[in-house]
Amino acid sequence: MKNRGIAFKLISLICGTVTLILVFVAQHNHTLFRELQFESIGENAENLAFSSLYRIESILKAVEKVPQHIAYSLEHSPLKKDDVLKLTRQVVENNPEIYGSTIAFEPFKFENSSEYFAPYYFKKDGKINFTYVGGENYKYFSWDWYRLPKENNSPQWTEPFFDEGAGDIIMATYSAPFYRETKGKKEFLGVVTADISLSWLTEILTSMKITPTGFAFLISKNGVFITHPQESFIMNETIFTLAEKLGDPSLKNIGSEMVNGNMGVLTNTSLIPGQKSWVFFHPLTTNGWSMAVVFPENDAFGDMHRITNRVILISTVGLMFLLICVIWISRSITKPIRVLSKVTDEIAGGNLDVPIPEIKTGDEIGRLADSYIHMRDNLKKHIEEVTHLTADKERMESELNFAAQVQQGFLPQELPEYLNYEFGAVTVPSRFVGGDFYDLIPLQNGHLGLVLGDVSGKGVSAALHMAQLLSDFRHISQKESEPDRVMQIINNTLYKRSSHGMFATATYITLDIDNRTMWIANAGHFPLVIRNYEGVISQHGLNGGIPLGILPDTKYQKEQVILNPGDIGLLYSDGATEAQNKNKQQFDFSGISSILEQEAQSSPEELISHLQQGILRFTENVPPHDDMTFLSFRALKP
């Protein structure tokens, strides 16, 4: 090198140094881009999966509510044949996600002359069709949708199956058993079902496009493919049989994780032949199914490889051009770099209005100046967009908070004060607004009306119906003194007003303040719980009618109860008993009665506070999935 010329030394030094730098930068950018690309695709897959899971879970939970409410109603208000047919048809008509429904009875339990009684309504070709299920060719007593809830004494989801003889499609069924009290024992009468067609699951998952060749699939809790881009796999293959055919232990491991209800990300080489892919999987908590999203490495890093090749090509051309132009570049590059350096400092300091001088060259410096201008303008635009988005979010939260305040304004702001009585009440919506409601309505002749109910659904629509029902109870209770008549009138009013299957459960009580006498009417809601002064817990209003708004001209029963000094009463919504902990166990009525047994001298407000604290301890701060409301009162000693 000593004997070489200055030009050679300069070219060798610059080109060698630039080459090393370019190699290092290219390698660093390649690694960084790979990590960012994988993280981005993973987040997209997770977001799409959670979005689809939430959509599917919401539909399944809505489907579960319908058989549960009908089963509860059948236990406390037996229906005639015409009512059963009408109610079953309304379930299919008013619930677009439900393909078909039946109320199936035990042999000779509905009609002494008929072994089978299971009227079935279902959708087909855009119409509501009807048939009777049951016979020598279709003994529904042995099918899982009837057998499992009967054996387990609880609602059950079936594995997907082809229902030949009834729906004639691939479906899954949610069945809720119902009973009747016979000589103090529960006698099984039958099940109420809601069928869902698995075609809508396929539509949801095929709409997910995370990469050009990526896809999603769904398996049952036994590993059977419910949806898959390869239609021949559906209901014919399990993820384990596929793993054996492909000789892929990693796919078998993925299947084990999915059927065990776990979530995570694992790699696989056989789901997309010839290339490595990542599999993100997450369970459906409702019925034990699991969903997986598959995205291949080629899709994930195809852009990265193209960018890397382009960078290498540009670098090579630049080095060749550098050999020719190094002297001229060394003179012309210094000045604009100093200018751009000052601009960089200004932008880094927050001055996005700094002027960038125009550099009339077509080389890297000119493009760099253009990039600075583009970066500055994009930063300004991005900051403006973030500012607008933040303002929109704050406005939306403000409106929701205002809606919550408006809904709270519908409820009693102050509890009534009566000599020898104490009252307490609270409602906690699972969202900003909810569908639970309560009221204490002063009536004529020294009476007081107490009502607590739950409108089906959640959110703003449930809150609007809740406000209307509160108004109905306040208006009609002033005209009708009998609680069963109040329920009948409100039921007809809600039935005429509801056009989308909206219904509500409620317990209404008329309390004679002076005589401590109550009359109770129940519309598909939980009964009134009373702990007397001796510590005995009893339930009243068990013989309730069906929920409000389902069938017109429904008759409701009333029950008379005498309060004694020291008795404390409690009304509550299903958000209390259905509160779940991390193990999916429910707080249930046993949790309420346990706290009631301990609250001998508590006031209604203290009792409600202890119930809320007990539920928080039980759920271990798991977010509630439904509104929770309590209304309590105590008769004091004169």
Image: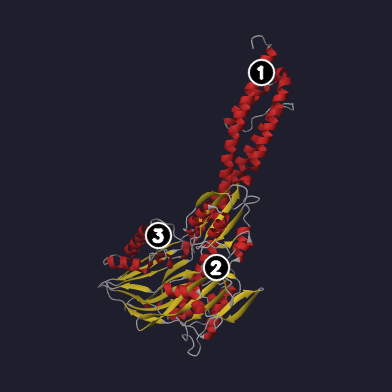
Quarter holding the C terminus is bottom left
Q: Disc 2 or 1, which lies upstream in sequence? A: 1
Q: What residue type is labelled 3?
A: Asn
Neighbour class for label 1 at 10 Å: few (<14), some, many (≥20)? some
Q: Earlier in the sequence, mark 1 or mark 3?
A: 1
Q: What element carries label 3?
A: loop
Q: Residue 12 carries which label?
A: 1
Q: Is residue 374 or residue 602 the one in the foreground? A: 374
| Residue 602 appears left or right of 377 | left
Q: Is residue 50 left or right of residue 419?
A: right
Q: Distance between the residues labelled 2 and 3?
A: 28 Å
Tag 2: amino acid: Pro
Mark 1 or 3, closer to the camera: 1
Distance between mark 1 and mark 3 Cα atoms: 70 Å
Task: Pick the residue in front: 132 or 417.
Answer: 132
Amino acid at the residue labelled 1: Ser
Please identify the quadrant where the N terminus is shown.
top right
**Disc 3 designates what residue?**
581
Q: Can residue 580 be seen from the camera position used here?
A: yes
Question: Where is residue 164 shown, x and y percent of the image?
Answer: 59, 75
- 43 in relation to 231, above or below: above
Real-space Cα distance between discs 2 and 1?
72 Å
Residue at 64% across, 74% down:
124
> Badge 2 is on which residue?
160
